[in-house]
Image (cartoon, rainbow, N blue to C red):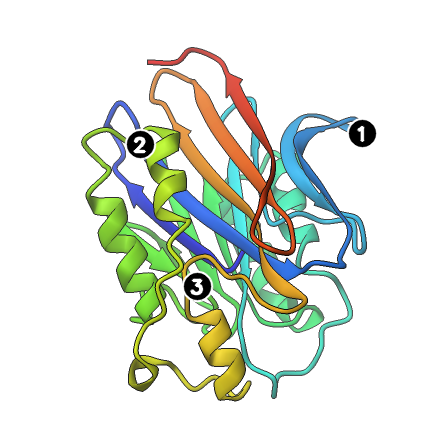
Amino acid sequence: MCLIVFAWRPGHPQPLVLAANRDEFYERATLPLGEWEESPGIYAGRDLLAGGTWLGVTAEGRFAALTNIRDPRQPRGERSRGELPLQFLRGEQDAEAFLAELAPRVEQYSGFNLLLGDRRALYFFNSEQGEIRRLLPGLYGLSNADLDTPWPKVLRSTAALANTLEDPQPANLLALLGDRQQPPRVLLPDTGVGVDWEMLLATVFIVGPGYGTRASSALVLHGDGGVRLVERSFGSGGELLGEVDLRLGPQE
């Protein structure tokens, strides 16, 4: 993923409400959201190049999502970051224990942010900071830097999420992810990729030559045990290619 905004409110009938965009090169082969045959009970999209995923859930409500850290100076890791969400979803460790085992070997991966949890607890880990953070209730935004770094797209989409929380239907969450408004150049971060790329990557929904938003995901974990995850897939011109509407367990 390249943008994740979410409301974490344990004890609420909908403890997790999340909207996320995955941005990637169009030529990178991908399968849409579905149950993994070799891992029954895990639902996620699949990167066919490295075999991992960017966001997934289980029928029991375990959740994992990943973004990369945008820094062209960082060394390239020997392992794919996309394996990390799968390792958590396939295992039985709680998020804190999983991250404690991961922390000593982060140098195997290029820089990443990892969001892990369930209906009871949610954890965040930035590989550059190395701190395991149990998140307090609140509204959060994440792109390709640390949590709540005030990039224009993060601020804009987090504010839009706040306006959906009275009725966090997937359609409303997906609508905010389609925002293509370009922020003023003066507000752009400088991550070392050059002004043209900063401009391209600055919108919530990206359409560019060879690169753009490939999938938008709306996730709601229900306190009664239900999971609702809707994913829309997009083509190279930003056109809608398909939608998967996943409903697991009770729906409040």
Q: How many angstroms separate mark 1 from mark 2 (CA)?
A: 29 Å
The quarter in which the C terminus is drawn is top left
Side (left or right) of 207 relative to 221 = right
Q: Which residue is mark 2?
A: 15
Q: How many angstroms separate mark 2 from mark 3 (CA)?
A: 21 Å
Can residue 39 be seen here? yes
Image position, residue 156 (x, y; %)? 28, 60
Q: Which residue is mark 3?
A: 143
Badge 2 or badge 3: first in the primary sequence:
2
Image position, residue 130 (x, y; %)? 48, 69
Camera-nearest residue between 101 and 83 = 83
As shown in the figure, which amino acid type bears the numbered disc 3?
A: Ser
Q: Which residue is mark 1?
A: 38
As shown in the figure, which amino acid type bears the numbered disc 2?
A: Pro
Can residue 118 be seen here? no
Where residue 105 sits, quadrant-wise, is bottom right
